[in-house]
Image (cartoon, grey):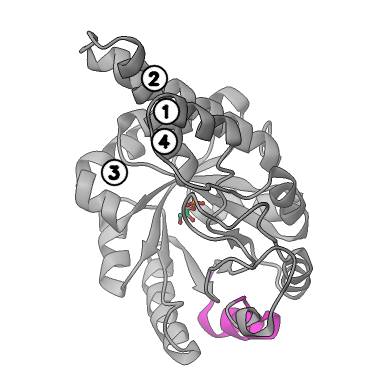
Amino acid sequence: MLVTGKDILVPARAGKYAVGAFNTNNMEITQAIIHTAEKLRSPVIVQMSEGAIKYGGQDLANIVIDLATRATVPVALHLDHGSSYESALNAIKMGFTSVMIDASHHPFEENVHETKRVVEAAHAMGISVEAELGRLGGIEEHVVVDEKDAFLTDPDEAVKFVEETGTDYLAIAIGTSHGAYKGKGRPFIDQARIKKIGELLSIPLVAHGSSGVPAEIVQRLRAAGGEIGDAAGIADEDLTEAAQYGIAKVNVDTDLRLASTVGIREVLKATPKEFDPRKIFGPARDVMSQIVEHKMGVLGSVGKA
Ligand code: 13P
């Protein structure tokens, strides 16, 4: 069933588990996400970035909405990193049930102002809103330097931000970062900060940049001819722990990109004569499903739908 983000995330926060928010760009990715959620009886969020909307538009949104509507588990369609009020409203018009307004690069007051406008409009239509405070970026190993600390979300500011904006869930900067290169070795996740914010705020918290970049997938990518540098992701245990402290939505895009590329490359390498798209994209869908399944286990959302 198609539901709002709040419908999925409020119970997750209360139950101390997190729900995966996976980015989609086509039918196979969407199927891997939603069919795996059904298999595991897990709620799930499918998200489209502005880039995905540019690429797949209403066609792609309709694929997600149709699968979500027919699904036997709760599914929300979420706008990832909406850059403006207009973008958020456009997504709502397209049928999204959750939108993010990301004004985190602006000064605090401007972020509040932009977020508040979106919250007012979205709430009038029954749609839930995610906002962001702080700026994502890595921390070097376990050393937290004051200068870099400034980029992480300040707990007291987070309280003020939520009070002033009325956002339904809040993305916080806690040491995760976007992409396949999250630092050398295991990135440091500031669990104490999550705990503090979780104690001060009862709304669901969101972790962006949470792909695990599994070593096995990286190896398979290289073996199949792909080129990738010193890739590193967020450790499973860090996400499991973060869910205990209030992280209820965990964003994953890179892992599915890597998985689909592995699937496609392996087929093309092993069978150069193959040109049936189903035999090329089908295995990619299977590798993505495995990633989704693993993540749902890590986040504790299995059996919660
Ligand atoms: P990853 O790059 O770690 O998959 O993060 C995706 C994300 O946060 C999308 O908003």
Q: Give the number of the mark in front: 1 or 4.
A: 1
Decide whether residue 162 is among the magenta residues.
Answer: yes
Quadrant where the C terminus sits is top right
Residue 238 location in percent, x, y?
A: 72, 51
Identity of the residue drawn at 26% across and 40% down: 60
Kindly report the distance in space between the C-alpha atoms of the residues bearing marks 2 and 3: 29 Å
Q: Taking 136 as reference, is 200 left or right?
A: right
Name the residue located 34 percent from the left edge and 39 percent from the top edge.
65
Q: Which of the 4 image quadrants contains residue 80? A: bottom left
Residue at the disc numbered 4? 68
Q: Is mark 3 on a helix, strand or loop?
A: helix
Q: Which amino acid does label 1 sit on?
A: Val
Between 58 and 194, the one lying in front of the other is 194
Mark 1 or 3, closer to the camera: 1
Q: Based on the picture, tell me whether residue 44 belongs to the magenta stretch.
A: no
Number of marks drawn: 4
Give the x, y percent position of residue 89. Answer: 29, 66
Name the spot of residue 113 as percent of width and height, x first: 42, 86
Disc 2 to disc 1, how far (Cα)? 6 Å
Q: Is mark 3 within 8 Å of ligand 1?
A: no
Q: Identify the disc placed on residue 299.
A: none
**Nearest the camera: 112 or 234?**
234
Q: Nearer the viewer, residue 167 or 149?
A: 149
Where is mark 2, residue-wise?
266
Instruction: Find the magenta span and give its range.
Output: 152-167
Q: What element carries label 4?
A: helix
Mark 2 or 4: the one toward you? 2
Q: Give the mark nearest the N terminus, 2 or 3.
A: 3
Q: Label for residue 61?
A: 3
Judging by the rendered image, the residue that carries numbered circle 1 is 262
Amino acid type for the residue under numbered disc 2: Glu
